[in-house]
Image: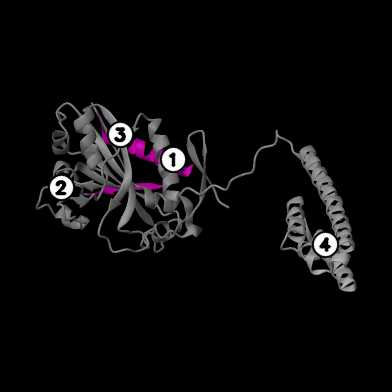
Amino acid sequence: MIEELTDELRKVNEEAQRLIAAAKSVDELRVAESRLTGKQGSLGKLLGSIGKFPPEQRGAVGKEINQAKAAIVEQFAAARARLEQTADKAAATAAQTYDPTLPGPVVPRGSVHPVTAVQWEVEDILSRLGFVVVGGPEMETEYYNFEALNIPAMHPARDMQDTFWLDNGRLLRTHTSPCQVRAMERLSAPLRIISPGRCFRYETEDASHANTFFQLEGLMIDRNISIANLIAVMKLVLEQVFHRDVKVRLRPGFFPFVEPGFELDMSCAICGGSGCPTCKRSGWVEILPCGMVHPNVLRFGGIDSREYTGFAFGLGLTRLAMMKYGVRDIRALNAGDLRAIIRPERRNGRAIIAKD
């Protein structure tokens, strides 16, 4: 039995060496030592087996097992000292290489949608002209969306807009013009406001039409406002957005809430005016319906039409983004396609676009 004990102690010593070699940290080493020398470990079981030996051999057996245990504990202690020394050196090296004055890690930021970037830029341009931003609900009443804008119940313009009606009798706004009426009621004249937001129309979708789009409407009311003021502001906005002289044309257009009304088109930036699916082969893109505010609309807003005049415009932000960034199909801007995203940066309050 003594020979078997010697063989078992040799195996325990080999096991200890394997555990020491596998340990990568002081904590792993401590766990390995506890498992080896504990009651359920290899060495602990040998200590518990002393009672199986004859009485005259138990003293010698206990002495041999305890000597083996002391040697194993000493090996673990030496290994622990080496690991602690290595950890201390690594910490010292890290402390020497760490520079607290350096900037922290850069956290990736999401991109701003092209339509949002264009909206920021137009808002900034018009705010420098004295316009203030106002908002309104996307779920509108029939009064504000139609009647207060000189579009009574049987007016054909309602059919042109193919409205989304809701079960509660309201509708998804077809333009942001209701914000203009609300602003006139609340602020009276003179005033300069812009109302950006999302609009909804039951459209047949193609390269330049979508049932959900973004618009920015503007309204300026004061004494002696003329068409010349309207054209000057519109040209300035487009030149500032595109950072160049923009070729435009003004043609008559019918909108019940303005009189006279105009369609301000710009030369298609996708094809350079030669004709493409985006501009329906015409070389021009309808970008800015506008006109002089109809007296009826002024009266609905509580403003004396004999004293004040004004102009209004509706800038298609989605189409403007298409022209500015060369997006050929409007559906790409509503599809969540990451290839259509352009990263803007804010500089001095303006949106500057940086393509990756």
Lower sequence index among marks 2 and 3: 2
For image coordinates 24% across by 49% down, the residue present is: 173
For image coordinates 32% across by 49% down, the residue present is: 198
Three-letter amino acid code of the residue under disc 1:
Glu
User: Regarding mark 1 in the picture, which secondary structure is present there?
Assistant: helix
CA–CA distance between discs 2 and 4?
85 Å
Q: Is residue 69 left or right of residue 301?
A: right
Disc ID at residue 142: 2
Query: Quadrant of the rendered structure where residue 190 is?
Result: top left
Residue 155 in percent (x, y) is at 12, 52
Residue under circle 3? 193
CA–CA distance between discs 4 and 3?
82 Å
Q: What segment carries the magenta color?
A: 224-253
Do tag 1 and tag 3 residues touch (Cβ < 8 Å)? Answer: no
Query: Quadrant of the rendered structure where residue 232 is?
Result: top left
Lower sequence index among marks 4 and 3: 4
Query: Quadrant of the rendered structure where residue 156 is?
Result: bottom left
Three-letter amino acid code of the residue under disc 4:
Ala
Three-letter amino acid code of the residue under disc 3:
Ile
Residue 38 in percent (x, y) is at 74, 58
Q: Is residue 28 left or right of residue 238?
A: right
Residue 99 in percent (x, y) is at 74, 36
Residue under circle 4? 16
Three-letter amino acid code of the residue under disc 2:
Glu
Q: Nearer the viewer, residue 131 or 283?
A: 131
